[in-house]
Amino acid sequence: MLRDIDKEMKSAQHLLYVSLKYTRTGDVIINLMRRWANMIEFSLEEILIHAKKTKKLKIIPHAPKLKQRAVIDIFKNNNTIKEIIALYSFFRKVDKLQNIRSNEFRKNVALIILDEGKEVIINMEKLKEWEKLLNDFIKVMLNFLKNKK
């Protein structure tokens, strides 16, 4: 499972730093968010498996929302986890939301997503901000997996 997380992370980094640099399209941004969603999903699964082994969790839920709640319960005081869960929920529904591509094939490519009446502008700065948050999340997850208690 950790290999899958690493594979998705490398693929996402390639999309962010290579593909997006040269193609500059909304499709690359959407694919990047899909990769991040997969990475988060694999990470949540790994956290839940470890929590069950260390008896912090009795059963691993099957429904995605219940998995998210279980992880939030495990990391009650961790804001990074809460932000990642919210971001994961957003990434999962991006395909279904209406989007507008702005400045495609130009330096300031952006994707505007209409989410529940709000416009979410996804540009390079936002993507790099999310990448930093995801890297923090991976560190938290790896520290949790190292603990035997």
Image: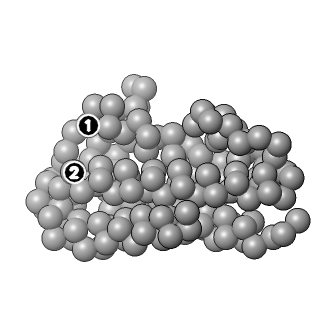
Q: Which of 140 and 70 is in front in this view?
A: 70
Q: Nearer the viewer, residue 139 or 132?
A: 139
* Residue 105, placed above or below residue 147: above
Q: Residue at x 22, y 68 (%)?
A: 19
Quarter of the image containing the N terminus?
bottom right
How many C-alpha atoms fall within 10 Å of the one at disc 2: few (<14), some, or many (≥20)?
A: many
Residue 14, labelled with which disc? none
Please indicate whether residue 3 sits to the left or right of residue 123 in the image: right
Q: Residue at x 56, y 43 (%)?
A: 86
Confirm whether residue 132 shows in the render.
no
Q: Position of residue 46 (x, y in %)?
A: 64, 58
Residue 26, labelled with which disc? 2
Q: Position of residue 57 (x, y in %)?
A: 81, 46
How many C-alpha atoms fall within 10 Å of the one at disc 1: few (<14), some, or many (≥20)?
A: some
Task: Give the quadrant of residue 106.
Answer: bottom left
Looking at the image, which residue sits at the far left? 105
Q: Residue at x 50, y 70 (%)?
A: 3
Q: Do the residues labelled 2 and 1 touch (CB within 8 Å)?
A: yes
Disc 1 marks a residue whose amino acid type is Asn
From the image, tell me which residue sits under label 1.
99
Please indicate whether residue 109 sits to the left or right of residue 7 in the image: left
Quarter of the image containing the C terminus?
bottom right
**Upstream in sequence: badge 2 or badge 1:** 2
* Residue 120, placed above or below residue 1: above
Please indicate whether residue 111 sits to the left or right of residue 140 in the image: left
Q: Judging from the image, what secondary structure is the residue with disc 2 in?
A: helix
Confirm whether residue 97 shows in the render.
yes
Q: Which residue is drawn at 41% across and 36% down?
A: 93
